[in-house]
Every structure is written in structure tokens, then in C-alpha cells.
Amino acid sequence: MAEIPMIISVDDHVVEPAHLWQTWLPEKHQAGAPYIERHGLGSLKYVGGTTYEYELTDDGPPCDIWFYEGKMFPHKRHVASVGFDRDDMTLSPITYDEMRPGCYEPKARVEDMLMNHVEASLSFPTFPRFCGQTFSEAEDKDLAMACVLAYNDWMVEEWCGDSDGALIPLTIIPLWDIDAAVAEVERNAARGVRAVCFSEIPPKLGLPSIHTGEWDPFFAACAATETVVCMHIGSSSQMPATSPDAPPAVAATLSFNNAMASLSDFLFSGVLVRYPTLTLAYSEGQIGWLPYVLERADDVWREHRAWGGVGDLVPEPPSTYYYRQVYGCFFRDRHGLDALDKVGVDNITFETDYPHTDSTWPNTLEVAQDLMGHLPQDVVDKICRGNAQRMLGLPQD
């Protein structure tokens, strides 16, 4: 049976500490900085996408809430659920005092990683959302830009700075200003950052599609600086669902659909042809769907070339570009592992999803052993760490 090496997790999450913008924003922007207050919160209900219904009450359970531009963003237990029993990982208010400190303190996070057989971790934002949508939707774009820069400075210097490489920086960009996004990629790459958040389907955020060419300077900058474009499920601010009254479990089951749509978009966009060193990473999308999508894309490329609109854009079968430039990741996906020859042993990475409900913490070693113990040792080594090292430009074993 294969031995599970220390894992590099390419999809975890950080709950931003209450002091972040008060500490890292310039003085001239402090008056409008996002801030935390504790209030009682009444009923909390998920209504779809990234939208929740709730109300402040004097007698409700305490909740630490971000306030920004007159809007409220309450912390929710299912987003910081590690340490709770499974049945207590509910959609309910939570305070920092109730969270495990590893949610928001870097030293505590590293301690939780080590007890979970994890050597290094890449963490997506929470309050800014998975690719910085909170700031993209803001009215005051000067303040929003400052908030983006402050987040990235905090990410690089405070969250990751003293971790000796255990915490890997993942930055955000001002999605509404592509020139500024390019500058931010270059600024962060100059200090060693090799990963940036992006939306899986930008038009769902009211942004240009990848087919317009407007994002090409951003993709060019990422390719030139070897910065991986990381797209988390939900980074389009929408989750797949069948109807407004469907339970959240439906969207959770279908969560890979946006990743599937996004990959299809990129494969037929010509972006991966124009930028052959650009790397894409799909986070929390799992991998079991990949073999059929790749087969279907290649079939469409062959059979629909006369009218499909991609004859000149994509000179080789689309799967060519996936195997060359795209990574997927998973935490529980036996079907995908059974199809490794089609998924691509060099194209998948592992994640723990700390501190979300799906997280394998603190039992990641046991989970990984159960999933992958039967595989050859060299394959396990690639999935658990080698592919992540190559993807992120980390030192190779």
C-alpha cells in the first residue's frame, strides 16, 4: 500500500481577521474601511448564489459581521466549521471567539495543518469572496482598489510572511480595471507570488467574457510571470440550481457544473493557444466529470468544425490544451481516481477545504489513504504534492 506523503493543499480558505483593513489600508481610506461589529442576528437563510436573508435583533445569537458601504456580511458557521460536530455545521451566526483560531490566525493555521498531515496550503478569500467580487461590486472604486491592494499586502506579508513557506500567497485583482489587474499581477509576482484568483465565468459578474480579448493583457501577464489563474467554484457568484426553492444540497451536488462550463469556455476560446505557458487551476470542482467533457470537446472539435466557430482558433483537439495547461483538484472523488488515465495523472492536485463543511480536517491522512492507498507510490506522490509543486513553482522534492 502506498504511503501518503505530506500534502500540499491547493484549496483552503482564510477568514480574514477583524483588523485587516484597519491595519493595512492607508490612513486616507480608513473612514470607509470594512470593519467588524458584533450584533445579535435573527433568522439566517440561504436564498441562492451568494445571497442570504437575515436581520439584526437584540435577542438573537451573537454574530461578528463585516460592514462595508452600508452592507452587512455576517460570518456563518458552515464557512468556519472545523472543530464542530458534523450535525452542528449549520447555517447559523458565528463569532471569532467560536471559530477555531486556525481560521484567521496564521500560526494557528500552520499548527492545524501539521496535525492534519498538510505541509503547505493555498487559501482563498472569504469576505472579498472567491475572486474579489465584493470590491468589484463596490460603488467607491478608489476605496475598493485600496482594499484590494491592502488585502494582497496582508496576504503576502502577514498571513504568509512568517510561515516559512507553509502558507502560499493567493492574491486578488481589481476585476473592473484590467490594466490595474495587470499591474497588480506584476507587483505581486515581483515579490514571489505565483497564484491569483479569477472568476470561472466573468460575464455572470457583469464583466467581459474571455472571448472578447479584453482579458488578454491579464492572461499575458500571468503567463509572463508564471502566475497560476485559480478559479474556485462559486467565483461567478452563482451556484448551479434547478429552482429558487431547491434545497442548498442541490447546488452543492451540482457545484462542479460551473467548473465544467468554464473549462469548456477556455478550451474553445483560443486563450490557451495564444498563451501556451498560461496555467489554469480549477478549485473544488472535483475531477470525475473531466473524462467525458474532454471526450465531448474533442468530438465537437472534429465533427462541428464547419460551423462551430473555432476552426481557426483551436488548431489541435481541445484536450491537448487541458493536458498541457490545466489542473483540477479534489478531496473525495473515487470516480475520478478510477479514470486517472483520462483525467491525467499530471493534471490533478489534492485539497482539504479547511475550514469549510466539506473539509477533511483533521482526518486528511486517513481520507487520502482510503482514496489513494491502492495507487502506485509515484502516482500518489504526484497527486498529493508533486503536481502542486510544479503548478505553483515550488521547490521539487
Image: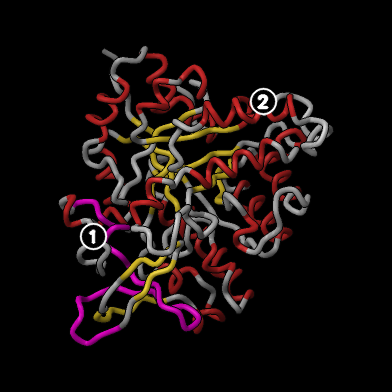
The answer to which of 213 and 113 lies nearer the viewer is: 213
Vertical arrangement, residue 14 with respect to residue 128, above or below = above
Give SS at disc 1: loop
- Circle 2 sits on which residue? 299
Q: Give the range drawn in magenta.
A: 56-83
For the point 43% across and 46% down, the residue is 254
Alpha-carbon distance for marks 1 and 2?
A: 43 Å
User: Does 140 sit left or right of 255 as displayed?
Assistant: right
Of the residues under marks 1 and 2, which one precedes in the sequence? 1
Give SS at disc 2: helix
Q: Position of residue 59 (x, y in %)?
A: 18, 84
User: Magenta segment: does it hold 59?
Assistant: yes
Mark number displayed over residue 90 = 1
Q: In which quarter of the image is residue 115?
A: top left
Vertical arrangement, residue 10 with respect to residue 187, above or below = above
The answer to which of 110 and 382 lies nearer the viewer is: 382
User: Does 152 sit left or right of 279 as displayed?
Assistant: left
